[in-house]
Image: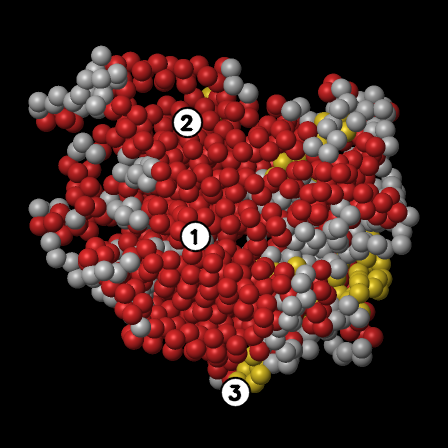
Amino acid sequence: MEFFLQLLLNGIVVGSIYSLVGLGFVVIYKSTSVLNFAQGEFLVLGAYVCLTMMVKYQIPFVPAFLITLVFSAVLGILTERLILRPMIGEPVISLIMVTLGLSSLLKAIIQGIWGTELQPFPDIFPAQPVHLGPLPVAQGYIYSMAGVAVLLVIFTLFFKYTRSGVAMRATAFSQQVSLSMGISVKRIFALAWSIAAVVSAVGGVLLAGIRGGLDGAMAFFGLKVIPVVILGGLDSIAGAIVGGPIMGILENLAGGYLDPLVGGGAKEVAPFVVLVLILSVKPYGLFGKVKIERV
Amino acid sequence: MTPRKSLAAILSAALLPATAAAQQEIKVGGIFDLTGVTSDVGKPFAQGVQDCVAVVNDAGGIAGRKVKLIGADYAYKIPQAQALYKKLVNDDKVIMIQGWGTGDTEALKEFVGQDKIPYFSGSFAAPLSDPAKFPYNFFVAPTYSEQLRSWLDWVKQDYAKSGGKGKPKVAFMYGDNAYGKAPIAAGKKYAAEIGVDVVDEAILPPNFQDAKSQLLVMKSKGVEYAYINVTTTGVSLVLRDAKTAGMNVKFGSNPYGFSETLPKVAGANAEGVTGVVPHVPYGTPVPGMATLEAAHKKYHPTDTHDAMYVRGWATCLVWMEGLKRAAAANNLTGAGVKAAIETLSDFSTGGLSQSVTYTPTDHRPTMTTSIYQIQGGKLVKIGDYIMPRTKEWFGL
Amino acid sequence: MRCGDFRQSYAEDMALFDSPLPRVLLGLLLAVLLVLPQFATTYWLDVLNRIFIAIIAAAGLNVVTGYTGLISLGTAAFLAVGGFSTAALAGKAGLPFVVVIPLSGAITALVGLVFGIPSLRLKGLYLAVATLAAHYIVEFTVTHWDSMTGGVSGISVPAAQFAGLTLENDRKIYYLIFPLMVGLLFFTKNLFRTKVGKAFVAIRDQDISAEVMGVNVFRYKLLSFAVSSFLVGVAGSLLAYQARIISPENFPITLAIDYLGMIIIGGLGSILGSIYGAIFITLLPEMLRLATDALSNQYPALMSLLAPMKSGVFGLVVILFLIFEPDGMAARWHHVKAYWKLYPFSY
């Protein structure tokens, strides 16, 4: 029983990181209907900027982190302005492809500037684990859960009560109608991209802090999180937040119970099987908006 | 190090076009991973090879001829490695190739035999050391299998020393790929022979973020020692998770997961971890290190490198000697270089690795495995483990 | 001189060639490609072979994604199924390639049918993730079914052989791959002049309308998956025959993304687009590598500095291309053709 509880708790804890990164996807998808394949590179870029600030310029963590956030916001705006804006009105699949191109480009920039070797990341969390019931948990994950909780509140309030938030939802519903209502769709897109980049930077720094080292391979995390947001529903903040722990739990249960039976490897595959089963019952994810089609 | 500085350094130090007359050059191919999934270790390895070639050329080359390393990046994409191989062999007419990972070595192992192109890999998989199957494959380290056997010997010793009763309980953690699985079968067999219990095997997926479930399973089985056969990032994650879970397991690791980088990344969690180190850490006071350090200072004044760089360098030293002997025998062809390398007997790389021996029937370079331990954040050698050069372990 | 389109009957509208000129030009191109191996070096033959294989697979992906509107991330998995089927049928059973290639395609088509079932319920990106699941399931299977696939260390494939004929090198296998590609492209092109193909397009454009018009949506979606997987499976089979050794590491998820890139850059729902996209995505890394090689052979120390530029230039080209021609290369080709059609009197 304790074994089961530990797996369960660990799934939730690790899943919080998935949620955090997943939020970046959702914010962009919600307002622009684009699945951003460059998300992984945003993570890595944020982490590297923070690393450079801390190690090279010897800035303490908190200001370095704030500089990283500012940098990411600018990066998001630039991405939108230079790459996504010329594509407004083009088919969604072209927009998705353009993010793949962006991912290649950013990867090259990252490798050009910081190289490919694994670099140690300063300890930003205390080393002592925190005990959650039977499970000792690294402090980095506690921050990630806290981060998810804070972001959940911020985003819920933002999308419900602020002008920009409502405008973003309107843009997601229909760009044309929003334009005719006087909403600057361009500004909304820029906002969405910079929010997503900032969220990614938070995720990247947390991830690098937990891992203790940083290299380009961390960009794979972007791809890994896609099933999470699909599970929750691509356009749902709550979906991303619930999807992360579910995916984490699935992975851990598969790892704990199936891996010893099949000789390993189930941890990676089993969640996908369950994912397809869930999707066949809820085709738009757990919390995604169900599209009602009329001809 | 800033990129601008490194660029300036390279420009000032090395921007000298290769000028020797083309037909005089000895052409050697290079298939490197500079940008792909293994570039964290592939790039320093490639730089070690490049710098070694540059130093040999600066000293006059091989029998008065410069060595031209025609290297390129394949980004760990196998079709690209195959294309590159075809280009190197058919268009560039290289006489041997310095390759890299398990993926490209496995994909090319049959072709190098047909084309008679000696192929040095960064993969130390045991089957490659059997010339009856793969006559043109070489590497400069004990095989992955010998490495694991040596580590198991250490486990047995350590267990007895720390007063353990019965058999030590060991787990293997590895990636679900050719590199990860390479020594596992040999390890299990050897463990049974020497009385070590392998109670658990755990697979670590590529780019995993957390290994808690695997560790919890290990904990429930009472594992006391574990060998982690993935690269440094993964090793560090396992160590961190194990520390958090409060596990009291003694970990060991393989040459691609254990270098000076590990204690830097894993911090205090790496304390006491043992690992196989076939190529000495950067800066170890051995005779061969002086040239290496001088070259490093010249070509990368602002960079730091670890044992991966030394690995590239040491591998290059071995085939350079092969080229030298082939040139002396006036037979600078693929077959000639292979024959020349097979005359190497107890050839010393200046202490950068164990001395290596190749014969036409046995490509196991050395049977000696050095095991190091991280003590106080430093890699400290705790012993050399010598395996018998037996028939039954050959190629396994 | 050709000027404008004057189509008076359905048959004319459906014709593959609207005038004799393209027919002649195509014939010339095929003739050139037929004698090319006599002059090309092994490296370029390898590149050509890989381009042709990519064209077949891209055309296959285009059937399901471009024509039927179902985004698939399973291309790498289907290539793997085709490849490992070939390894088993040719290596273990010793069958000749005339049997192995269609059988590999058929096996892949079956697998495609199974993984197409979620398309009953799922659409768009949600379906894409179901195919992503297919990728991981296939990857897990080929990695762990050691007795059949050789597991992680891979499996070697004998040279394609049939009736005493052995295609052991790139020059010989070219004459298998190239005609097969032409034939399959012809088949695919014609598919969209038939009822089946038009049903696919109807589903893409509006699935509910298609159903109202009497198209059995689910059946045709599955059929689309099957046809697509068949083509991809044949490509996988050829890939195994050409590479001669395959392992799970040959088929990473990034490969599936590359293929999606091919058809988007080339042009969705266009055979010509599949061709252009496959050429572009296969050739660009080679070109970039040749360029960086040339530079870094001159200045060896620059090699590790130049290497990342490959992916950078690749990304940049993709971005610029999509910004300036979001409909793909096939559309650009169309514009160019239209311009020259009326030259110099275009208005």
Please tell me how crowded label 1 is: few (under 14), some (14-19), or many (20+) other residues with Cα within 10 Å.
some
Relative image position of residue A50 (x, y in whole percent): 59, 64
Q: Could you say which is closer to the camera, residue B331 or residue C266?
A: C266
Secondary element at image label 1 = helix
Name which residue lies at 42% across and 74% down: A151
In this image, A182 relative to B110: left or right?
Answer: left
Query: Residue B115 occupies which quadrant of the picture?
Result: top right
In this image, C271 relative to A266: left or right?
Answer: left
Quarter of the image with the C terminus of chain C in it: top left
Dots 2 and 1: beta carbons under 8 Å?
no
Above-or-below relation of B331 to C274: above
Relative image position of residue B91 (x, y in whole percent): 61, 23
Secondary element at image label 3 = loop
Name the outermost residue toward the bottom.
A133
Image disc number at residue C177: 2
Write down the residue under mark 3.
A133
Residue depth check, mark 3 versus mark 2: number of the one nearer the observer = 3
Look at label 2 and name its amino acid: Ile
Name the outermost residue toward the right.
B287
Residue depth check, mark 3 versus mark 1: number of the one nearer the observer = 1
